Image (cartoon, rainbow, N blue to C red):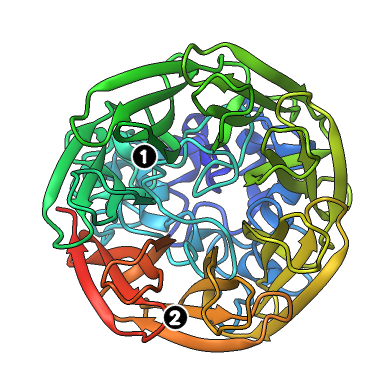
Amino acid sequence: MSVKSITIAVCIAAAALFLVVGPADAYDRYNDGCQNCHGDFTGSTSPKGSTFPDDDKHKMHRESQYMDAECDLCHTSGDGNDPFIGSSDGTQANPGLGCTGCHDDVGLRARHALSLSTCASCHPSDPPPMGENVKPTYYGTVDTWVDNSCNPTAQANLNENWTIGDFEGLDNDGDDLYDTADPDCLAMDLFSELLALPDVNGNSSPDVGVVTFVPGGSYHVKVRDGGDGAEISDIDFGDDPAIGAAAYARSGAAPAVVLLGTRPAGTVRAQIKDTSSGAQITNLFFGSEYAGVDVAVVPDANQSGDPELAVLGENASQRVRLEVQDISDGSVIQTLFLGTSMSAHSLTVYDDLDNSGADDLSVNGVVRSTNKVRARTIDPVSGSIFADFFFGSAYAPVAFASHPDLNGANGDELDFLGYRSDIGRIRIQNKDATDGAFIGSRFWSTSALPVDLEAIADTNADGLDDLLVLVETDTGTGKVRIQKNGTGALLETLTFGALTDPVALAVSADLNGNGSPDIMVLGTQGGVPRVQIRDSSTGLNIRNIDFP
């Protein structure tokens, strides 16, 4: 989400003339001069060369499939689409800081002047800018999808990756260093994925993997024993900015872990390594034209004896592509082009729905012209699309999950977790993945933010799998709502208070021997990634595992 190109301030060429005009900001409003370098506020182009989704800078900020910023974050009533740089109406959740709610004013001046001395005559008391790792006021709130100022993940429509064709965000502190290239970001762990692993070290206990970005600039997958938290392996995957991760079991060997990343030249690469030894198993390459969006392991679709790897991508022309390769030799099983009408969001894998002998998957996204959330169910071998259905346009997608048959149609279902930031309302909806038939829906209003969604084996003895919804509360702790699948009725709420800033949810096989699956949440404690594990049937805390 590269928004450096729309930073609300003057360009360098104009700095000397305009940054010394008085005690106030050089420009009070966008059209006072910002448009000279960054294009019209509602325009389609920028002299800086950025490419906006749908060729619309304002839509990039406003639409739910992009930044989804509330209007009053930027605007004052009656400002005529000429917003004030440092003030706006604000919302219930955020003060009215205008453009500087995302583009911090001190960092903004430092970025455009390249040194605070240029601005010092008008701003003599400017403190040092906040570090790159400090989120601006609006980041990570209910009023926008913009988050994580270190922008560690090379994925479209995430954190600061909103313009098309690159994964470079803002220089928030004006030191000419972007994202994780800034040492401020190397001082903290930036983790992206939680993996529930089968037994890695042969002690009959399921294990846990966490993807972390460590000081020094490389991504690691750290594997811990689920039984006692002991370290099993710490696998270095290098400095490819991570897009996503997955894992799969191997016959007669330790499970494998997949980390999808982007090489410096833009090539999308999947590295596959042994979770026990860290040894390289193979690398798969998916070209450089299509930026990676998501990755999924599909159980052996072509009967080769190894699973397949599906990678979802989107190119600079907003064309969506699904490519499936055989993990054993990298041979291409299927390449499917899905047009430009829908943005790419994620992949969901199902058991064989069309009785072809191969498991299936859906490509999930948002229709650009209507904002409708869409799922297209696909046979990964033949490439046939045998279901195409929608979840409406009011709720922006947060996560999807699959689970076994609920409606007696003998096929998996697709669960959708959505959010309306304007009214603080969460929605889960279930549809049949084979034909899109409606099964159930549930809404609730909350100040908490939805984070993740997973299916879990039956927790209330009704014979049907249930759903887990992870939310982040006002205080930063995690809560997991266990909800009855189909109707969405709330069964129980578990608080994960041993961590803050929850980012991911996973279901582990039974760890404490009572026959019930366990619930894992990834967050942080004291700046260190932590996984807290609770029993799904009793709610008791099983253990906390740190990943320093």
In front here: 170 or 534? 534
Q: Residue furthest left?
A: 230
Tell me which numbered mark, 2 or 1, is placed earlier along the sequence: 1
In front here: 388 or 77? 388
Q: Measured along the vertical axis of the image, is residue 198 above or below residue 28?
A: above
Q: Position of residue 397 (x, y in %)?
A: 67, 59
In front here: 71 or 39? 71
- Asked if one can make out residue 43 in the rendered structure from this viewpoint, the answer is no
Reading the image, the residue beneath label 1 is 179
The quadrant holding residue 271 is top left
Reading the image, the residue beneath label 2 is 473
Of the 4 image quadrants, the one containing the N terminus is top right
| Residue name at image x 56 percent, y 83 percent | 461
Q: Measured along the vertical axis of the image, is residue 374 above or below residue 540?
A: above
- Number of other residues with Cα within 10 Å of mark 1, as a class: few under 14, some 14 to 19, many 20 or more: many
Instruction: Please state which of the two labelled residues, at mark 2 or mark 1, is closer to the viewer.
Output: 2
Q: CA distance from mark 2 to mark 1?
A: 27 Å
Q: Is residue 130 left or right of residue 112?
A: left
The quadrant holding residue 415 is bottom right
Question: Which SS class for mark 1?
Answer: helix
Q: Measured along the vertical axis of the image, is residue 365 above or below residue 22?
A: above
- Number of other residues with Cα within 10 Å of mark 2, as a class: few under 14, some 14 to 19, many 20 or more: some
| Residue name at image x 24 percent, y 50 percent | 189
Q: Are marks 2 and 1 in contact (CB under 8 Å)?
A: no
